Image: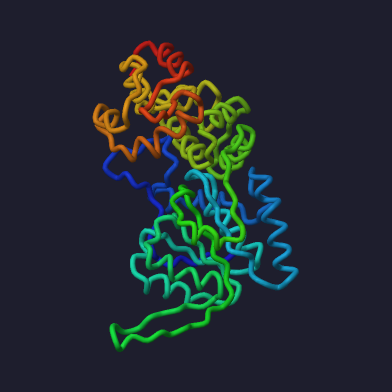
Amino acid sequence: MAIISSNIGNNEAPFHNKELRLVDSNIIPEEKRNNNLNLARPVTLQEFIGQEQLKSSLKIAIDASIYRKEPLEHTLLYGQPGLGKTTLAFLIAHAMHTKCRIANAPSIERPRDIVGLLLGLKEGEVLFIDEIHRLNRLTEELLYSAMEDFRLDLTMGANRGARCRTINLPRFTLIGATTKLASISAPLRDRFGISQKIEFYTHDELKQIIVNYSGLININLDDEASYNLAKISRGTPRIALRLLRRVRDYAQVVKKTNFISGNLIKKALNSYQIDEKGLDSLDRQYLFFLKQNNNIPTGLDSIAAGLAEETSMLEFVVEPYLIQIGFLARTPRGRLLTALGKKYIDSQNGNF
């Protein structure tokens, strides 16, 4: 499988002014450079753990494209960070026996950037654009004819000297990845022939991912340890592997061992202030802040001011998991703690 980077952008965690949260699903620079993480990537769709329905649909589409000897239809993958959208794009290219060129939408700033990417493609190749919802309007409009008719319609010059030029492109597959499907404009979204949501992973699927990765980093886990780690990983492989690496650090430095038990998992995560629900100190502070408001809906700006955090950090990083596990409700009037959330806070004995 050939992976070609365009050197346009990267997909790192967007909140650089705060200390890294281990349970944040955004990627960080260390993880982009980690060779063991690269080795952990599957090389075929069959090796990819989880997402069975999605893999089945993709395999049919890929096999049909190979049978017709034509590129795969443009494909949109959407879901939360850390679920494997980038990996799936690479695996699709591998299954199509072609190269995958990668780019990150926020860094495709000028029309000439996307023109350069498109002109560099060869017949049948895959162009993967991460965070595609962040493309600017001019760049997006250039993609319309490229995706539909495999051509670029360019306007050169200005005023009376302006002239149009059409450049034919090789037939290619655009794979877009996004964490915010609703932010993609309807004209762009409609040009994708295949649209697939990446779901959260089950505990058993995460356990298998953890066990496979532990072999790469020379760590032995008992069955209880691997399952306990899977349960607090928020359904996200990236978080599971990050927590495993931090538990490894604790085991090797504090306990001088490469064997990890369920009890050691608990002690290691306690040292990082992560509990059995997978919540860290910021999650608990958020919930406790709501409890103090006595069941009155609280606006996001007020919560952010009270916690000295950015509203975008809370809305897109903290809140989704609290909603997923039933601790938080969003209402038109503001955020509310649910009955489950109140029960959890009461069980913490003010430990914030």
Q: Residue at x 56, y 39 (%)?
A: 200
Q: Position of residue 192 (x, y in %)?
A: 57, 61
Q: Position of residue 243 (x, y in %)?
A: 47, 35
Query: Farthest residue toward the right?
Result: 67
Q: Position of residue 67 (x, y in %)?
A: 75, 69
**Quarter of the figure that contains the C terminus:** top left
Judge by depth and name the residue closer to the eye, 299 or 282: 299
Position of 210 with respect to 304 (left or right) is: right
Judge by depth and name the residue closer to the eye, 88 or 19: 88
Q: Residue at x 47, y 83 (%)?
A: 166
Position of 66 with respect to 36 (left or right) is: right
**Quarter of the figure that contains the N terminus:** bottom right
The answer to which quarter of the image holds residue 317 is top left
Position of 301 with respect to 3 (left or right) is: left
Total numbered labels placed on residues in the image: 0
Q: Residue at x 50, y 30 (%)?
A: 324
Q: Position of residue 4 (x, y in %)?
A: 49, 67
Q: Residue at x 34, y 19 (%)?
A: 296
Q: How is the image coloured?
A: rainbow
The answer to which quarter of the image holds residue 224 is top right
Relative height, residue 341 to residue 127 (above, below) = above
Relative height, residue 228 to residue 133 (above, below) = above
Relative height, residue 328 to residue 315 (above, below) = above
Judge by depth and name the residue closer to the eye, 159 or 219: 159
Query: Farthest residue toward the bottom?
Result: 161
